[in-house]
Image (spheres, helix red, strand yellow):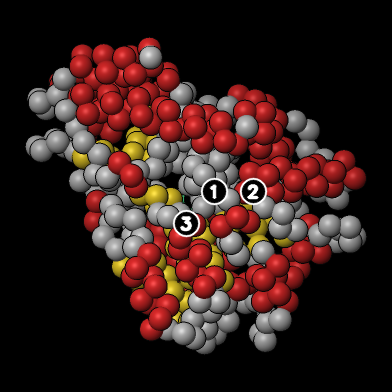
């Protein structure tokens, strides 16, 4: 006989999902109403306005796709690309590879601009690729590479795209509400994000936004979008401004309550204050990690505050450490991905989880665990460094 599921109380400091605040969980459990109920349509309008503020955009076509970040990625590529198009994809980690996969599945060609994992995308390499490929229609890159903890200079990359008359497509799954992201000022044409990273909402929704240039391209397609579910021409009629809301699919009503609440929390704190909070706790965490005797693989100027790639000390069974943290501390941290598997842990300070308690908990748990496994670390110095940081 199966029983009700009661999850353990974890602290989530991996690459996502991040801890969801009790306020958001409470919103999730409010009564379900119809997705065409006038009250729900009012909520959709409010969500759109809050998302526009979080993205810093006036884009009319701004909405949450009813599926996780990967679906937002797919929505952007499948709407903007047609068979035969050429797209420049900058890759410096796992998620750039998924962009390539999406481009190719649209029947388009991906011209890859590669940078080493752990480095930001090099604007000079992008410029060379743009010069060599004057027929490219778009440039795509990941703003915050969650697989390596690297921030690329989205503003510079978008400016190059614009200079060469390409659409700028940006993966902001991990950046939204965690680091500076200015969709309009930077000239981003299509952006997708997720709810489970720095918004600290439940997983399963993907906020997206399209510029007028992007919408013109979608409206003028020669072929229909291959995916019916993700076709923005149809979704525009469901989410559209003053037009009648026609049934497209049943929105995940309760997840929308949760998204709304998490966006309200960002609004109350202030977007810039949320960016600053991520940075503040990241600085404390780094001070502690370095005093512990470990290092981050990314150079300080390209580090993501919300995702810290920490080098694993020699001779340590990294999976055993994560298991111990989960079992004895109820603390989840992430493993490395791809070429960084077994080289780094990925420690998230995302959204609601970017706070002093979590920084101290993680330093303390990681320090004592590593010490018990014989690593040359100094847990007392780590705690002292973090406390020192917070006391000034
Ligand atoms: C997490 C993530 C995704 C995918 O989001 P899901 O919600 O897991 O589908 C895409 N891109 C980046 C950079 C991510 O960190």
10 Å neighbourhood of mark 2: few (<14), some, or many (≥20)? some
For residue 201, side relative to residue 376 (left or right): right
Residue 377 seen in render? yes
For residue 164, side relative to residue 257 (left or right): left
Label 3 with label 1: CB-CB less than 8 Å? yes
**What's the mark number on residue 56?**
2
Residue at 52 percent across and 29 percent down: it is 352
Residue 364 seen in render? no
Mark 1, ligand 1, within 8 Å: the answer is no
Residue at 34 percent across and 63 percent down: it is 122
- Tally the numbered discs: 3
Distance Cα–Cα, label 2 vs label 1: 7 Å
Front-lying residue, 139 or 171: 139
Picture coordinates of residue 106 (x, y %)?
A: 53, 78
Q: Which is more N-terminal, label 2 or label 3? A: 2
Residue pointed to by mark 3: 154
Residue 360 drawn above or below residue 98: above
Residue 130 drawn above or below residue 169: below
Of helix, strand and loop, which one carries label 2?
loop
Residue pointed to by mark 1: 181
Distance Cα–Cα, label 3 vs label 2: 14 Å
Label 2 with label 1: CB-CB less than 8 Å? yes
**What's the mark number on residue 324?**
none
Of helix, strand and loop, which one carries label 3?
helix
Picture coordinates of residue 61 (x, y %)?
A: 72, 60
Front-lying residue, 342 or 182: 182
Of helix, strand and loop, which one carries label 1?
loop
Q: Which is more N-terminal, label 1 or label 3? A: 3
């Amino acid at each position: 006989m199966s029983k009700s599921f009661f999850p353990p109380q974890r602290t989530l400091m991996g690459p996502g999902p991040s801890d969801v605040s009790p306020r958001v969980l409470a919103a999730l459990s409010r009564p379900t109403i119809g997705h065409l109920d006038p009250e729900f349509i009012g909520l959709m309008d409010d969500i759109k306005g809050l998302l526009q503020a979080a993205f810093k955009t006036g884009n009319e076509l701004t909405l949450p796709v009813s599926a996780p970040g990967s679906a937002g990625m797919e929505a952007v590529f499948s709407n903007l690309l047609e068979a035969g198009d050429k797209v420049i994809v900058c890759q410096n980690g796992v998620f750039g590879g998924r962009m390539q996969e999406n481009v190719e599945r649209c029947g388009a060609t991906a011209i890859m601009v590669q940078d080493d994992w752990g480095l930001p995308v090099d604007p000079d390499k992008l410029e060379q690729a743009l010069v060599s490929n004057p027929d490219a229609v778009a440039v795509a890159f990941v703003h915050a590479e969650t697989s390596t903890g690297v921030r690329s200079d989205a503003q510079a990359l978008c400016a190059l795209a614009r200079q060469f008359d390409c659409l700028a497509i940006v993966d902001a799954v991990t950046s939204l509400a965690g680091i500076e992201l200015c969709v309009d000022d930077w000239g981003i044409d299509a952006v997708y994000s997720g709810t489970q990273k720095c918004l600290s909402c439940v997983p399963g929704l993907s906020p997206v936004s399209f510029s007028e240039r992007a919408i013109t391209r979608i409206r003028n397609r020669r072929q229909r979008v291959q995916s019916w579910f993700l076709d923005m021409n149809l979704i525009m009629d469901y989410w559209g401004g003053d037009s009648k809301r026609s049934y497209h699919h049943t929105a995940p009503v309760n997840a929308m309550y949760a998204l709304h609440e998490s966006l309200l929390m960002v609004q109350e704190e202030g977007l810039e204050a949320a960016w600053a909070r991520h940075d503040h706790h990241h600085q404390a965490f780094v001070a502690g990690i370095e005093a512990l005797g470990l290092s981050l693989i990314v150079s300080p100027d390209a580090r993501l505050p919300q995702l810290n790639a920490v080098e694993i000390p020699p001779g340590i069974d990294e999976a055993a450490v994560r298991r111990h943290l989960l079992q004895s501390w109820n603390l989840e941290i992430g493993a490395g991905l791809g070429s960084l598997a077994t080289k780094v842990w990925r420690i998230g300070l995302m959204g609601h989880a970017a706070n002093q308690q979590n920084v101290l908990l993680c330093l303390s748990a990681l320090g004592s665990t590593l010490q018990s496994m014989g690593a040359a670390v100094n847990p007392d110095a780590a705690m002292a460094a973090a406390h020192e940081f917070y006391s000034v």
